């Protein structure tokens, strides 16, 4: 049995976890900005309104929308502070294996800030809104990878069966595709973030059903992965891998149910917000599964 890496100091582990939470949380607050119609509450960038970095009583946008958008911008600084403190801790504790992922958090936040500015300056163009969300899931994935390493979490030395690895990779690809198509659904629907924002010139009903079909395919793949794990893997593998697959199944089932409810109830804001939060949880669960599966497949060991 190879020696597993030791966890990093407690402070570093907590900061790594905080990075995952804050990176995920700002996606949800960004969704709240859109759902309240506050996407252009600050009409320009980096200023909120021409001549001022903060909302002013004289600006034409409604004060509530201006302060909601401005508040979300302020959260970016909380996110950046967390990333900077985390990177300082990585340097302080000489955690060389975390340096790249730590630096990636800082660079990703700056990239998101610039893309967010472009999104505002283009009047919430649905393509830039989608890109803003998709960049977030890349950053979230790197944050989760960092957290895993900081906690010394590695899979067992047991090698996964080729069929299990294949199904796991298909699951990850389908999850990503579901999220990408989900951004197209959003860009075709009513919650644009502002009444003047453009929409994709697509039939929202058709795109929604394509999205639903992909979710069904993802559920089928998850069930196949559960069966392959149960029948083809050792009991030890089922402990660390099977549990993650079951968690993903529960999360995707809940997210699918929320999706159907929001569709058939006319997309109420509260349900849409829950769906945005669910999308983040689905991605976290899928990426956690992918990290474990890829690492396990690369290990040499006996079943």
Image (spheres, rainbow, N blue to C red):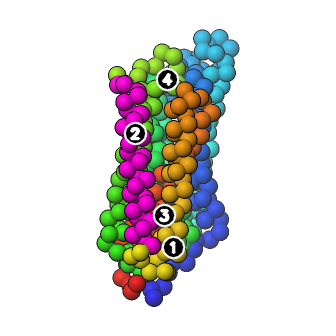
Q: Earlier in the sequence, mark 3 or mark 1?
A: 1
Residue 57 position (above or below residue 214): above
Gap in Å between the C-alphas at discs 4 and 2?
Answer: 16 Å
The residues colored magenta run: 202-230
Residue 96 position (above or below residue 50): below
- What residue sits right under mark 3 in the picture? 245
Q: Which mark is residue 240?
A: 1
Residue at screen point 56% across, 41% down: 258
Query: At which x and y percent is residue 174?
Result: 37, 51
| Disc 1 packing (10 Å; few <14; some 14–19; many ≥20) | some
* Viewer-nearest residue: 170 or 14: 170
* Viewer-nearest residue: 208 or 47: 208
Residue 91 position (above or below residue 143): below
Gap in Å between the C-alphas at discs 2 and 1?
Answer: 30 Å
Answer left or right for 174 relative to 155.
left
Query: At which x and y percent is residue 42?
Result: 56, 22
Q: Are marks 4 and 3 in contact (CB under 8 Å)?
A: no
Viewer can see residue 118: no
- What residue sits right under mark 4 in the picture? 190
Q: Which mark is residue 211?
A: 2
Total marks in image? 4
- Which quadrant, please, contains the C terminus? bottom left
């Amino acid at each position: 049995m190879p020696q597993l890496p030791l966890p990093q100091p407690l402070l570093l582990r907590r900061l790594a976890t905080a990075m995952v939470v804050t990176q995920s949380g700002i996606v949800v607050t960004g969704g709240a900005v859109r759902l309240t119609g506050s996407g252009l509450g600050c009409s320009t960038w980096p200023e909120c309104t021409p001549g001022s970095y903060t909302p002013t009583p004289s600006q034409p946008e409604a004060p509530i929308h201006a302060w909601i958008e401005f508040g979300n911008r302020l959260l970016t600084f909380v996110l950046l502070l967390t990333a900077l403190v985390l990177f300082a801790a990585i340097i302080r504790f000489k955690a060389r294996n975390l340096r790249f992922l730590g630096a990636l958090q800082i660079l990703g936040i700056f990239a998101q800030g610039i893309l967010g500015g472009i999104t505002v300056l283009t009047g919430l163009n649905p393509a830039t809104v989608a890109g803003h969300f998709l960049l977030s899931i890349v950053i979230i994935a790197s944050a989760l990878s960092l957290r895993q390493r900081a906690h010394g979490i590695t899979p067992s030395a047991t090698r996964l069966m080729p069929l299990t690895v294949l199904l796991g990779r298909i699951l990850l690809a389908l999850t990503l595709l579901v999220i990408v198509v989900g951004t197209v659904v959003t860009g075709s629907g009513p919650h644009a973030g502002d009444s003047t924002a453009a929409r994709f010139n697509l039939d929202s009903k058709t795109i929604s059903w394509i999205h639903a079909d992909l979710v069904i395919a993802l559920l089928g793949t998850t069930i196949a992965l559960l069966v392959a794990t149960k029948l083809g893997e050792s009991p030890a593998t089922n402990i660390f891998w099977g549990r993650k697959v079951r968690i993903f199944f529960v999360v995707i089932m809940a997210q699918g149910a929320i999706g159907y409810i929001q569709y058939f109830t006319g997309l109420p804001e509260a349900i849409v917000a829950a769906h945005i939060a669910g999308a983040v949880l689905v991605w976290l669960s899928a990426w956690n599964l992918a990290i474990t599966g890829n690492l396990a497949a690369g290990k040499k060991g006996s079943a």
